[in-house]
Amino acid sequence: MPQVQHIETYDTTLRDGEQGLGIALSLEDKLRIVERLDRFGIDIIEGGYPTSNPKDIEFFKRVGQLNLRHARIAAFGSTRHKGTLAQADPGLAALIESGAPVVTLVGKASASQVQAALRTSLEENLRMVADSVAYCVAQGREVIFDAEHFFDGYDENADYALEVVQTAANAGASCVCLCETNGGQLPARVGAVTAAVHKALPEVKLGIHCHNDSGCAVANTLDAVGAGATQVQCTVNGYGERVGNADMLTVIANLQLKMGYQCVDDLSQLASVANFVAESCNITLPARTPYTGSAAFAHKGGLHASAQSRLEGAYEHVDPATVGNSATWVVSELSGKASLVRKAQIMGLNIENDEALTQRILDDIKKREAEGYAYEVADGSLYLLILRHMGKLRPHFMLESFRVIVDDREDTGCWAKDAASEATIKIIVGETRTVATGEGAGPVGALDTALRMAIEESYPQIAGMELVDFKVRILDENVGTNAITRVVITTSNGEQSWGTVGVSENIIEASWNALVDAIEYGLHRMGI
Ligand SMILES: [Zn+2]
């Protein structure tokens, strides 16, 4: 059998994707996305610019401590400034200091951009490319060169664009990625230009990086691969600047299922990865997303539905199971018994030998997901749910009542300003009833403070648990009823972090339930 060609997957969700409108990821979110993409089998994960802000610098420190199975981490930055030395460039120094094994350098491949935007000579730009790549290679890093504005540059001055690619490769870049930066090109041209570059420079490994401004990012990426590119730079769900990048998941599915290439071993994680990253970004995955959306294999029309029931696959381009989706949609990755058993096992719970129990848990998850819960990002709540069904959940405290007051006193016209919150809480631990009052800038902060005050004497360990992220989403899927609020909280003990979820028509109630799960999970995992 002929060997199936591997196409290298390079994910830039954490850098290019995060530049998308409405996308903000906390440090914890980023680290958990890295772990998820690693488990999925992505080859290279770009973390961001190690120079841009303290969060990204901290990211590279923390990501180095993760136990990644497969992926290599890339740090992103520019070629050196004009008229300076690579070894004196602070940006390049930061890339090396980040400790990332892969360094991705972006440089200009368009002659007009060099002159107008960079305001330097074409020769100096080539020296900037060569020096910067060679410097990072000499520091022991794998260097990928992103040739910015490559396709538009090729249309204006093909010789120069090619010279930039050749220069980067000669200086030691392992791959030169052709970037369709403005996203306006169409597939036939992207394919033809990539083929021309491949023919002119057959020894250079080529990548492709496409934006979706003309709605062709995925098609452009596929055509480039067909023309000889062997690395795809994309983002999960196509998040990115303006209208976004090529969707990594659609690209992978098409490459594997339609074009005979290999990217990842387990394509059935596709829908789960899409949902995990969407939840982390606090965005609902659009139902009509190819392969992974909830409508991707939905059969609504009477004719289609009845034909589909007689002939499975009558209106399906692929079997939904191959991409972890299903004709009747289940949101979470826990769509089957086997994956629930595996997930429980990872969390240290054994439910393998109890079919009835597994089914009960699965039914409960499905019911709750229909109500608005999402367990992809709430391992802590999932753990407690499984424990409850196993009959092993021992609540550490009982709530008698709480009351939250939000008080605005400043005279700022008809608008409120600096409103203060105060929560009073009555908690029972064992035989002891405690009444505590906490203050906070917001009602959830006040509840958190009051709860900690009420139980810290019995459980001093909670001092080490810190609420690090708080996401609120109004779910509008439930048309005709009151809006449902989903709250996802991330808590950290300095070594590990865990997500918990609460759902209610009342935002305070949803927050409280997520908060209680966060503390309960933390205490259970400490064996308390
Ligand atoms: Zn880009």
Image (tube, rainbow, N blue to C red):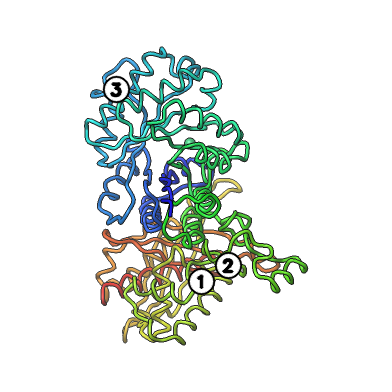
Task: Answer yes or no: is residue 170 visible.
Answer: yes
Q: Which residue is mark 1?
A: 335
* Residue sitting nearer the eye, 280 or 1: 1
Relative side of 329 to 28, left or right = right
Identify the element where label 3 is drawn. helix
**Residue at 69% across / 73% down in the picture?**
309
**Alpha carbon distance from label 1 to label 3:** 51 Å
Which badge, 2 or 3, comes first in the chain's sequence? 3
Hey, what amino acid is under mark 2? Ser
- Name which quarter of the figure residue 464 lies in: bottom left
Q: How many marks?
A: 3
Disc 1 CB within 8 Å of nearest ligand 1 atom: no
Image height of 503 relative to 199, above or below: below
Where residue 218 sits, quadrant-wise, is: top right
Q: Quadrant of the C terminus?
A: bottom left
Residue 414 location (% of width, % of height): 61, 48
Residue 326 got which mark? 2
Gap between marks 1 and 2 measured at Cα: 9 Å
Cα distance in 3D space between marks 2 and 3: 51 Å
In the figure, 464 relative to 94: above or below?
Answer: below
Quarter of image, res 202: top left
Q: Mark 1 or 2 closer to N-term?
A: 2
Q: Which mark is residue 131?
A: 3
Picture residue at 45% right of the left edge, 46% below the top: 13
Label pair 1/2, CB-CB below 8 angstroms: yes
